[in-house]
Amino acid sequence: MLKMVDVFSDSPRSYATLSYTDITMVKATQGTWYVNPKCDVDYQAAKKAKKQRGIYHYCEGGNPESEAQYFYQNVKGYIGEAVPAVDWEAGSNRSWGNTTWVKRFVTEFHRLSGVWCLIYVQASAISQVANCAKDCGLWVASYPSMDWKSWKLPNMKVNTSPWPTYTVWQFTGDNMDRNIVNTTVEGWKKLAKGSGKSVTVKPKKKSEWKKKNGVFVLGQSLKLHKTPHIDSPAIAELPKGSAIKYDATLQGPKRLWLRQPRSGGKYGYIVGRDKYNKALGKFE
Protein backbone atom coordinates (compact mmCIF):
# COMPACT_ATOMS: atom_id res chain seq x y z
CA MET A 1 0.00 0.00 0.00
CA LEU A 2 1.01 3.63 -0.58
CA LYS A 3 0.81 6.63 1.73
CA MET A 4 -1.01 9.74 0.49
CA VAL A 5 -1.44 13.19 1.98
CA ASP A 6 -4.10 15.57 0.65
CA VAL A 7 -3.45 19.30 0.77
CA PHE A 8 -5.29 22.59 0.22
CA SER A 9 -4.37 26.28 0.30
CA ASP A 10 -4.01 26.50 4.10
CA SER A 11 -1.90 23.36 4.41
CA PRO A 12 1.82 23.80 5.16
CA ARG A 13 3.60 23.77 1.80
CA SER A 14 5.98 21.14 3.19
CA TYR A 15 3.13 18.59 3.19
CA ALA A 16 3.36 18.31 -0.60
CA THR A 17 6.88 16.87 -0.42
CA LEU A 18 6.98 14.80 2.78
CA SER A 19 9.80 12.28 2.54
CA TYR A 20 7.70 9.37 3.80
CA THR A 21 4.67 9.77 1.51
CA ASP A 22 4.18 8.39 -1.98
CA ILE A 23 1.28 10.48 -3.29
CA THR A 24 0.25 14.13 -2.97
CA MET A 25 -3.43 14.89 -3.60
CA VAL A 26 -4.01 18.61 -4.19
CA LYS A 27 -7.28 20.56 -4.00
CA ALA A 28 -7.77 22.29 -7.34
CA THR A 29 -11.24 23.81 -7.51
CA GLN A 30 -14.53 24.37 -5.72
CA GLY A 31 -17.94 25.08 -7.17
CA THR A 32 -17.61 27.15 -10.34
CA TRP A 33 -15.77 30.11 -8.84
CA TYR A 34 -12.72 29.00 -6.85
CA VAL A 35 -9.27 27.86 -7.96
CA ASN A 36 -6.79 27.00 -5.22
CA PRO A 37 -3.98 29.59 -5.63
CA LYS A 38 -1.49 27.07 -4.23
CA CYS A 39 -2.60 24.19 -6.43
CA ASP A 40 0.15 24.39 -9.02
CA VAL A 41 2.75 25.35 -6.42
CA ASP A 42 2.08 22.14 -4.48
CA TYR A 43 1.58 20.08 -7.62
CA GLN A 44 4.89 21.08 -9.20
CA ALA A 45 6.74 20.65 -5.90
CA ALA A 46 5.33 17.14 -5.56
CA LYS A 47 6.22 16.34 -9.15
CA LYS A 48 9.79 17.57 -8.65
CA ALA A 49 10.01 15.40 -5.53
CA LYS A 50 8.93 12.44 -7.70
CA LYS A 51 5.61 11.94 -5.92
CA GLN A 52 2.58 10.50 -7.64
CA ARG A 53 -0.12 13.16 -7.86
CA GLY A 54 -3.83 13.65 -7.63
CA ILE A 55 -6.13 16.67 -7.97
CA TYR A 56 -9.60 17.10 -6.51
CA HIS A 57 -12.72 19.24 -6.79
CA TYR A 58 -14.87 20.25 -3.80
CA CYS A 59 -18.59 20.10 -4.64
CA GLU A 60 -20.91 22.99 -3.83
CA GLY A 61 -23.97 21.26 -5.27
CA GLY A 62 -24.74 23.60 -8.15
CA ASN A 63 -25.27 22.20 -11.63
CA PRO A 64 -23.10 19.04 -11.68
CA GLU A 65 -22.18 19.29 -15.34
CA SER A 66 -21.11 22.92 -14.88
CA GLU A 67 -18.94 22.04 -11.88
CA ALA A 68 -17.39 19.11 -13.78
CA GLN A 69 -16.62 21.39 -16.73
CA TYR A 70 -15.09 24.00 -14.41
CA PHE A 71 -12.91 21.35 -12.77
CA TYR A 72 -11.81 19.99 -16.16
CA GLN A 73 -10.98 23.41 -17.62
CA ASN A 74 -8.71 24.16 -14.66
CA VAL A 75 -6.93 20.79 -14.44
CA LYS A 76 -6.78 19.58 -18.03
CA GLY A 77 -3.02 20.19 -18.06
CA TYR A 78 -2.68 17.51 -15.35
CA ILE A 79 -4.90 14.92 -17.02
CA GLY A 80 -3.05 11.70 -17.71
CA GLU A 81 -0.52 12.07 -14.91
CA ALA A 82 -2.71 12.94 -11.89
CA VAL A 83 -5.69 10.97 -10.59
CA PRO A 84 -8.79 13.21 -10.46
CA ALA A 85 -11.18 13.03 -7.51
CA VAL A 86 -14.46 14.61 -6.51
CA ASP A 87 -14.97 15.61 -2.87
CA TRP A 88 -18.58 15.00 -1.76
CA GLU A 89 -19.18 16.46 1.71
CA ALA A 90 -22.05 18.14 3.55
CA GLY A 91 -20.29 21.47 4.20
CA SER A 92 -21.14 24.29 1.74
CA ASN A 93 -22.97 21.72 -0.38
CA ARG A 94 -26.55 22.68 -1.22
CA SER A 95 -27.22 19.30 -2.89
CA TRP A 96 -26.10 17.11 0.01
CA GLY A 97 -28.35 14.06 0.08
CA ASN A 98 -28.94 14.08 -3.69
CA THR A 99 -28.15 10.59 -4.98
CA THR A 100 -27.72 11.54 -8.65
CA TRP A 101 -25.46 14.60 -8.35
CA VAL A 102 -22.07 12.87 -8.19
CA LYS A 103 -23.04 10.39 -10.89
CA ARG A 104 -23.79 13.26 -13.25
CA PHE A 105 -20.53 15.01 -12.30
CA VAL A 106 -18.27 12.00 -12.90
CA THR A 107 -20.07 11.12 -16.14
CA GLU A 108 -19.51 14.62 -17.50
CA PHE A 109 -15.87 14.68 -16.37
CA HIS A 110 -15.28 11.32 -18.02
CA ARG A 111 -16.89 12.57 -21.22
CA LEU A 112 -14.45 15.47 -21.28
CA SER A 113 -11.29 13.69 -20.14
CA GLY A 114 -11.64 9.95 -20.66
CA VAL A 115 -10.85 9.47 -16.94
CA TRP A 116 -13.14 8.42 -14.09
CA CYS A 117 -12.80 10.33 -10.82
CA LEU A 118 -12.22 8.81 -7.42
CA ILE A 119 -15.12 9.66 -5.12
CA TYR A 120 -14.35 11.04 -1.67
CA VAL A 121 -17.16 10.50 0.82
CA GLN A 122 -17.58 9.72 4.49
CA ALA A 123 -18.38 6.08 5.20
CA SER A 124 -21.85 6.90 6.59
CA ALA A 125 -22.89 8.62 3.33
CA ILE A 126 -21.72 6.06 0.76
CA SER A 127 -25.34 5.40 -0.22
CA GLN A 128 -25.43 8.86 -1.83
CA VAL A 129 -22.77 7.82 -4.37
CA ALA A 130 -23.41 4.07 -4.59
CA ASN A 131 -24.57 4.34 -8.20
CA CYS A 132 -20.98 5.20 -9.17
CA ALA A 133 -19.46 1.95 -7.87
CA LYS A 134 -19.31 0.36 -11.31
CA ASP A 135 -17.12 3.10 -12.80
CA CYS A 136 -15.30 4.95 -10.02
CA GLY A 137 -12.89 4.09 -7.25
CA LEU A 138 -13.86 4.85 -3.64
CA TRP A 139 -11.94 7.29 -1.43
CA VAL A 140 -13.60 6.74 1.92
CA ALA A 141 -13.18 8.82 5.07
CA SER A 142 -13.49 6.82 8.28
CA TYR A 143 -11.58 7.77 11.47
CA PRO A 144 -10.99 5.81 14.68
CA SER A 145 -11.10 9.20 16.45
CA MET A 146 -10.17 12.84 15.83
CA ASP A 147 -7.07 12.31 18.01
CA TRP A 148 -5.39 9.77 15.72
CA LYS A 149 -2.32 11.84 14.77
CA SER A 150 -0.25 8.97 13.44
CA TRP A 151 0.52 7.08 10.25
CA LYS A 152 -0.04 3.83 12.11
CA LEU A 153 -3.05 2.22 10.47
CA PRO A 154 -5.93 1.84 12.95
CA ASN A 155 -7.39 -1.62 13.50
CA MET A 156 -11.00 -1.03 12.51
CA LYS A 157 -13.57 -2.16 9.98
CA VAL A 158 -14.31 0.30 7.21
CA ASN A 159 -17.65 0.28 5.39
CA THR A 160 -17.20 0.32 1.61
CA SER A 161 -20.37 -1.41 0.31
CA PRO A 162 -21.33 -1.59 -2.57
CA TRP A 163 -17.61 -1.30 -3.39
CA PRO A 164 -15.81 -4.53 -2.51
CA THR A 165 -13.02 -2.44 -0.98
CA TYR A 166 -11.60 1.08 -1.01
CA THR A 167 -9.05 2.54 -3.39
CA VAL A 168 -8.11 5.15 -0.77
CA TRP A 169 -8.88 5.26 2.94
CA GLN A 170 -8.52 8.57 4.76
CA PHE A 171 -8.08 7.61 8.40
CA THR A 172 -7.10 10.95 9.99
CA GLY A 173 -8.41 14.45 9.40
CA ASP A 174 -7.19 16.62 12.26
CA ASN A 175 -3.67 17.99 11.99
CA MET A 176 -3.09 16.22 8.66
CA ASP A 177 -5.24 14.28 6.21
CA ARG A 178 -3.51 10.89 6.16
CA ASN A 179 -4.55 8.30 3.61
CA ILE A 180 -3.59 4.75 2.70
CA VAL A 181 -3.87 3.80 -0.97
CA ASN A 182 -4.83 0.26 -1.89
CA THR A 183 -2.75 -0.05 -5.07
CA THR A 184 0.79 0.17 -6.44
CA VAL A 185 2.54 3.06 -8.16
CA GLU A 186 1.76 1.42 -11.51
CA GLY A 187 -1.85 0.98 -10.44
CA TRP A 188 -2.07 4.70 -9.56
CA LYS A 189 -0.61 5.68 -12.92
CA LYS A 190 -3.20 3.52 -14.64
CA LEU A 191 -6.01 5.28 -12.76
CA ALA A 192 -4.58 8.63 -13.88
CA LYS A 193 -4.50 7.67 -17.55
CA GLY A 194 -7.98 6.18 -17.75
CA SER A 195 -8.94 5.36 -21.30
CA GLY A 196 -7.19 8.49 -22.49
CA LYS A 197 -10.10 9.18 -24.82
CA SER A 198 -12.67 11.89 -24.37
CA VAL A 199 -16.10 11.30 -25.85
CA THR A 200 -17.20 13.62 -28.62
CA VAL A 201 -20.86 14.46 -28.48
CA LYS A 202 -22.21 14.96 -31.97
CA PRO A 203 -24.34 18.07 -32.26
CA LYS A 204 -27.96 17.46 -32.97
CA LYS A 205 -28.97 18.04 -36.53
CA LYS A 206 -30.77 21.31 -36.99
CA SER A 207 -34.41 20.84 -37.87
CA GLU A 208 -35.10 21.99 -41.41
CA TRP A 209 -38.23 22.75 -43.38
CA LYS A 210 -39.10 20.23 -46.07
CA LYS A 211 -41.07 21.31 -49.09
CA LYS A 212 -44.33 19.40 -49.22
CA ASN A 213 -47.71 20.51 -50.49
CA GLY A 214 -50.92 19.24 -48.99
CA VAL A 215 -54.17 19.95 -47.21
CA PHE A 216 -54.72 19.49 -43.49
CA VAL A 217 -58.25 19.19 -42.12
CA LEU A 218 -58.37 20.04 -38.42
CA GLY A 219 -59.69 17.33 -36.12
CA GLN A 220 -60.07 19.88 -33.33
CA SER A 221 -59.86 23.62 -32.73
CA LEU A 222 -56.24 24.77 -33.24
CA LYS A 223 -54.33 28.03 -33.22
CA LEU A 224 -52.57 29.32 -36.31
CA HIS A 225 -49.30 30.82 -34.99
CA LYS A 226 -47.05 33.61 -36.24
CA THR A 227 -43.93 31.43 -35.70
CA PRO A 228 -43.46 27.65 -35.34
CA HIS A 229 -43.47 27.74 -31.55
CA ILE A 230 -46.34 26.68 -29.31
CA ASP A 231 -46.07 29.86 -27.24
CA SER A 232 -45.86 32.28 -30.15
CA PRO A 233 -48.76 34.73 -30.75
CA ALA A 234 -51.80 33.39 -32.59
CA ILE A 235 -52.96 34.80 -35.92
CA ALA A 236 -56.30 33.10 -35.45
CA GLU A 237 -57.98 30.16 -33.75
CA LEU A 238 -59.42 27.85 -36.39
CA PRO A 239 -62.44 25.64 -35.64
CA LYS A 240 -62.60 21.88 -36.08
CA GLY A 241 -63.15 20.93 -39.72
CA SER A 242 -61.19 23.88 -41.12
CA ALA A 243 -58.97 22.99 -44.09
CA ILE A 244 -55.65 24.72 -44.57
CA LYS A 245 -53.24 24.38 -47.46
CA TYR A 246 -49.59 23.96 -46.47
CA ASP A 247 -46.40 24.07 -48.55
CA ALA A 248 -43.77 22.74 -46.09
CA THR A 249 -43.35 20.70 -42.90
CA LEU A 250 -40.95 21.00 -39.97
CA GLN A 251 -40.35 18.13 -37.55
CA GLY A 252 -39.33 19.86 -34.34
CA PRO A 253 -38.10 18.14 -31.16
CA LYS A 254 -41.71 17.69 -30.02
CA ARG A 255 -44.17 18.65 -32.76
CA LEU A 256 -44.72 18.46 -36.50
CA TRP A 257 -45.39 21.94 -37.84
CA LEU A 258 -47.16 22.81 -41.09
CA ARG A 259 -46.48 26.06 -42.93
CA GLN A 260 -49.39 27.93 -44.52
CA PRO A 261 -48.54 30.54 -47.20
CA ARG A 262 -50.31 33.85 -46.61
CA SER A 263 -50.54 37.17 -48.46
CA GLY A 264 -47.53 39.48 -48.64
CA GLY A 265 -45.04 36.60 -48.55
CA LYS A 266 -45.91 35.82 -44.95
CA TYR A 267 -46.72 32.48 -43.34
CA GLY A 268 -48.88 30.97 -40.63
CA TYR A 269 -47.88 27.87 -38.67
CA ILE A 270 -50.04 25.12 -37.21
CA VAL A 271 -49.32 21.88 -35.34
CA GLY A 272 -50.06 18.77 -37.40
CA ARG A 273 -48.81 16.20 -34.87
CA ASP A 274 -48.42 16.72 -31.14
CA LYS A 275 -45.53 15.71 -28.84
CA TYR A 276 -46.95 12.15 -28.70
CA ASN A 277 -46.84 11.97 -32.52
CA LYS A 278 -50.65 11.98 -32.59
CA ALA A 279 -52.16 13.56 -35.71
CA LEU A 280 -54.42 16.49 -34.79
CA GLY A 281 -56.37 16.22 -38.02
CA LYS A 282 -56.47 14.50 -41.39
CA PHE A 283 -53.76 14.87 -44.00
CA GLU A 284 -55.13 14.93 -47.56
Image (cartoon, helix red, strand yellow):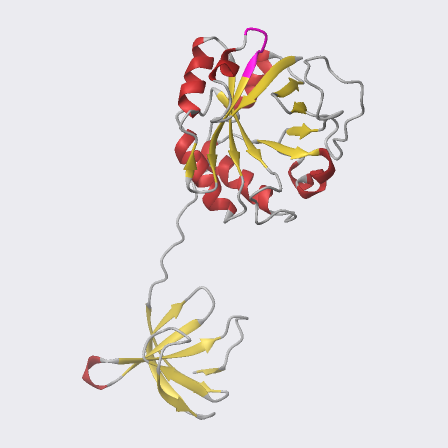
Residue 26 at what x, y percent from top left?
50, 24
Viewer-side residue, 9 vs 110: 9
Quadrant that contains the C terminus: bottom left
Quadrant that contains the N terminus: top right
Whether residue 37 appears in magenta in the rendering, the answer is: no
Rendered residue at 36%/73% (across/down)? 228
**In this rendering, does residue 107 appear at all?**
yes
Q: Residue furthest top?
A: 19
Secondary structure character of the magenta stretch overall: loop
Residue 128 at what x, y percent from top left?
68, 43
Left or right of 236? Residue 50 is right
Rendered residue at 59%/41% (across/down)? 91
Determine which quarter of the picture holds residue 207: bottom left
In the depicted structure, whether residue 107 falls above or below residue 77: below
In the depicted structure, whether residue 212 falls above or below residue 262: above
Determine which quarter of the picture holds residue 216: bottom left
Rendered residue at 72%/12% (across/down)? 152
Whether residue 21 appears in magenta in the rendering, the answer is: yes
**In this rendering, does residue 189 appear at all?**
no
Viewer-side residue, 18 vs 49: 18
Left or right of 50? Residue 212 is left
In the depicted structure, whether residue 96 falls above or below residue 253: above
Residue 144 at what x, y percent from top left?
76, 24
Residue 31 at what x, y percent from top left?
48, 42
Span shown in magenta: 19-23
Rendered residue at 74%/37% (across/down)? 124
Q: How many marks?
A: 0
In the depicted structure, whether residue 118 falls above or below residue 41: below
